[in-house]
Structure formats: C-alpha cells, structure tokens
Amino acid sequence: MRLYDRDAAVHYAQRWALSRNPAYYDFDTLGGDCTNFISQCLYAGSRVMNWTPETGWYYVNLNRRAPAWTSVHYLYRFLTRECGAGPYCRLASLPELEPGDVIQLGMSDGQFYHSLLVLSAGDSPAGIFVAAHTADALWRPLDSYFYERVRCLHIAGVREG
C-alpha cells in the first residue's frame, strides 16, 4: 500500500478540465465524460490500474476498458472494494474532503449521476471547489450544482496488487 498523490491528481484536473487529453476517448456523446475524467485524475494520483476483467479499473482504449473507468456506479463499487490493485476510498463527510478526493452527485431515489474532483476543500458546499467534465468545470463551487444527495469519497491510499 502507498500514498495517493493528491497534488498529481489536482494538477492533472487543472490541466485537462477545460479540454480533452487525446490519450483518452471523449465519452461526451456516449452518456458523458465525467467519470472518465475522474478516472484519469485518479490514475494521475495513483499510477496503478487494476486489470481484473469486469470488476477492475483500467483503460486501454474505447473498446478495452473496465466499466468502473467510465461509470459513476461502477467507479463507486471499485473504489469501495476491500482488495485488489488501485486507489481505494472510504466514505466521508464534506468537511473531511481533501483536494484530490471525489464527490458524486445523486437524486433522492439513490441514483448517482455525476462525478467531480475536489480541487479545494471546505466545511460547506460553498467552500468546496471542483473540476469536472461533461459540463466542463474548473474551480466551480459545489453549491452551484443541483443535486439531492452527495456522496463523498476520500481516497485513502493505493494498493499495488
């Protein structure tokens, strides 16, 4: 186990929030690019992919990627797993978040639909600033989004395998 490089994740987010890294497919026309972008940021901070078919977290190209790389639901399942290579998280409250953590926005029915990367932490949604794709954002305040539920994922570390 090793530390997650929060600075590298945030730097990556700042570099690519308002454009697209040509090394990755742009999923905007296939349901949205938000979780693909978050996975790129997490990879920048972890430098470890999990090559387990179906339940892993990896990207080679459009046709060779794990569901967790681009799906809000599957990314959450991957990050909260108890074993295997790659970044992992624990659920947290808003005041516990740090730069490089992930926020997922959801509806009251429990469905989560959007992933964001924390750039600057704070005690309330007004004090938390994020980066995102689909509706591209850089230093956008969390309280400017519409959501009914929020899920805070504090990246606790990186398992190497």
Image (cartoon, helix red, strand yellow):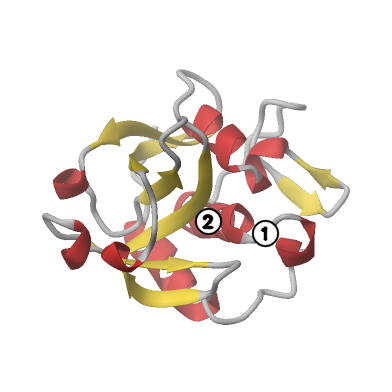
Write down the residue under mark 2: 38
- Give the residue type that dot 2 points to: Ile
Single out the residue that lies furthest toward the left: 123
Residue 159 in percent (x, y) is at 46, 32
**Image height of 132 relative to 108, above or below:** below
The amino acid at mark 1 is Gly
Q: Is residue 63 above or below residue 14?
A: above
State the residue lying farthest toward the top: 82
Nearer-the-camera pick, 135 or 108? 108
Residue 27 image point, x, y percent: 74, 61
Question: Horizontally, is 43 left or right of 62 in the view?
Answer: left
Q: Is residue 64 left or right of residue 33?
A: right
Q: Locate residue 82, reporting x and y percent.
A: 45, 18
Mark 2–mark 1 Cα distance, whole angstroms, equals 12 Å
| Coordinates of residue 143 in the picture (x, y in percent) | 27, 63
> Under tag 2, what secondary structure?
helix
Q: Earlier in the sequence, mark 2 or mark 1?
A: 1
Q: Quadrant of the N terminus?
A: top left
The quarter of the picture where residue 146 lies is bottom left
Q: Is residue 147 visible?
A: yes
Q: Quadrant of residue 14?
A: bottom left
